[in-house]
């Protein structure tokens, strides 16, 4: 049988050997249960994670405007700064260097620094020198690394998919 759109639907077809309709196949129901290495979170997508040591990870979920510490031993997810933190507006990236967790927030145009336990330390404003780009990494000497896209031109040049990796001193000078 063909439906209203003309598509063939086998469950509506009549068999030449039999005059009854074929039964529509039922879809299987599968329950997805978390295993021992799973921590349930309210986040729709975790974009980045950084290992904090042991079974603890920092995660950022930009689509939920959230960053958290996930502890796989305790099977908990604790939002950085608490459930209603004013520390973030739009956390977008994170990384861990030495003993500090760094979280980039494009909405507040700053990089926040946290202890591995999830306590805020301070923040660094985005620098005009790098057109507000937020660092994505830091080395043991203290240099930050960030992505800097070319400026867009009136003809659309600069809007390409290439960028430079820039190394910046700790003071952004």
Image (tube, helix red, strand yellow):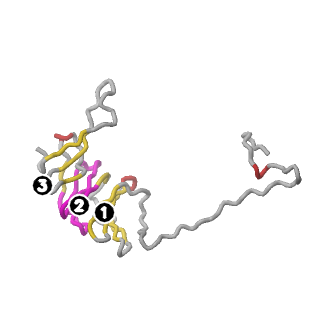
Instruction: Please name which of the two marks, 3 or 2, marks the residue nearer to the observer.
Output: 3
Between the C-alphas of marks 1 and 3, the distance is 22 Å
Question: Magenta part mainly helix, strand or loop?
Answer: strand
Q: Which residues are magenta?
A: 94-122
Query: Which numbered tag is attached to residue 141?
Result: 3
Does residue 91 appear to the left or right of 3 in the view shown?
left
Q: Is residue 117 above or below residue 48?
A: below
Mark 2 — residue?
101
Between the C-alphas of marks 2 and 1, the distance is 8 Å
SS for dot 3:
loop
Q: Earlier in the sequence, mark 1 or mark 3?
A: 1
Q: Is residue 158 above or below residue 119?
A: above
Q: Position of residue 69 (x, y in %)?
A: 31, 66
Instruction: Please name which of the two marks, 1 or 3, marks the residue nearer to the observer.
Output: 3
Q: Position of residue 93 (x, y in %)?
A: 30, 53
Q: The C terminus appears in which quarter of the rendering? A: top left
Q: Quadrant of residue 129?
A: top left
Which residue is rendered at x = 23% and y = 42% of the image? 165
Q: Earlier in the sequence, mark 3 or mark 2?
A: 2
């Amino acid at each position: 049988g063909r439906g209203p759109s003309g598509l063939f639907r086998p469950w509506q077809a009549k068999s030449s050997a039999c005059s009854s309709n074929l039964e529509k196949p039922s879809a299987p129901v599968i329950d997805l249960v978390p295993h021992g290495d799973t921590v349930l979170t309210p986040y729709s997508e975790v974009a980045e994670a950084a290992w904090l040591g042991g079974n603890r990870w920092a995660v950022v979920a930009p689509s939920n405007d959230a960053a958290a510490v996930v502890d796989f031993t305790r099977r908990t997810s604790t939002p950085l700064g608490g459930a209603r933190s004013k520390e973030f507006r739009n956390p977008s990236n994170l990384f861990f260097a030495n003993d500090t967790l760094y979280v980039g927030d494009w909405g507040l145009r700053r990089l926040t620094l946290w202890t591995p336990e999830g306590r805020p330390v301070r923040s660094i404003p985005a620098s005009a020198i790098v057109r507000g780009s937020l660092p994505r990494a830091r080395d043991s000497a203290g240099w930050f690394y960030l992505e800097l896209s070319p400026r867009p031109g009136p003809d659309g040049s600069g809007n390409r998919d290439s960028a430079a990796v820039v190394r910046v001193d700790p003071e952004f000078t």
